Image: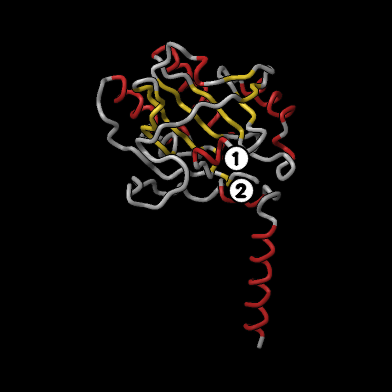
Amino acid sequence: MLSSISFAALVLIAFSSCKNESTDKSWDLAVSKIVQPEFTEINSETETKGYTIGDEATDFKLKDVNGKMVSLSDYKDAKGFIVIFTCNTCPYAVASEERMVALDKEFKSKGYPLIAINPNNPEVQPDDTYELMREKAKEAGFTFPYLYDESQTIYAKYGATKTPHVYLLQKEGGKNIVKYIGAIDDNVRNAAEVKERFLANAVNELLEGKEVSVKETKAIGCSVKQ
């Protein structure tokens, strides 16, 4: 009898946690302390929504934290783009901020600038308002555009489900072609323990005129809040 009552209580607690996932950051904070997940290359036959490798990514026009509107077409001399969907407070996104600044420094001068986009709905996640984005960009020393997906439509076109979620694009014949989708590297929690720099490796392969060898990995992060 006692076992049955205990089991029922656990079910109710689990159900309650699922309902509150969109606004309660405690779950994400707890997850960030779990042992680093194993990264694997995603099977290209896996069903996905949004862009897949080889698709053309359409341009967008979104507001930066400095108030200016930014589009991919603004970068006339770019060879491609590192587009990362991220946000203000997700532990995974926060842990990636210094890496994002470093990636922009490493590859912007080589023709692959980084562009960050916040896909979260501030009505669901109050910590992701435009004003707080401006504070985040200043505090974190962002050297790249941090754009507000106010209509929450661009992330859906791309198929981003996590923050952070990476899309590497390359200009080909006037089109922006998706070359890599997934994680920045193989240790989202601890940059000091990174062994495989998935994104950097992919950019370097493109710069060398090679095909990207690891085209997709699993993005590890907080769910996009909608």
Q: How is the image coloured?
A: secondary structure
C-alpha gap between disc 2 and disc 1? 7 Å
The mark found on residue 91 in the picture is: 1
42 on left or right of 187: left
Q: Amino acid at mark 2?
A: Asp
156 on left or right of 136: left
Q: Amino acid at mark 1?
A: Pro
Tag 2 residue: 28
Q: Are circles 2 and 1 on residues that touch, CB within 8 Å?
A: yes
Percent from the top left, x then y, of residue 141? 61, 19
Q: Residues within 10 Å of mark 1 (few under 14, many from 20)?
A: many
Report the front residue among 202 and 194: 202
| Element carrying mark 2 | helix
Q: Residues within 10 Å of mark 2 (few under 14, many from 20)?
A: some
Mark nearer the N terminus (2 vs 1): 2
Quarter that holds the N terminus:
bottom right
| Element carrying mark 1 | helix
Percent from the top left, x then y, of residue 218? 42, 45
Q: Quadrant of residue 148?
A: top right
Q: Would you place residue 133 above or below residue 181 in this image? A: above
Percent from the top left, x then y, of residue 163? 55, 39
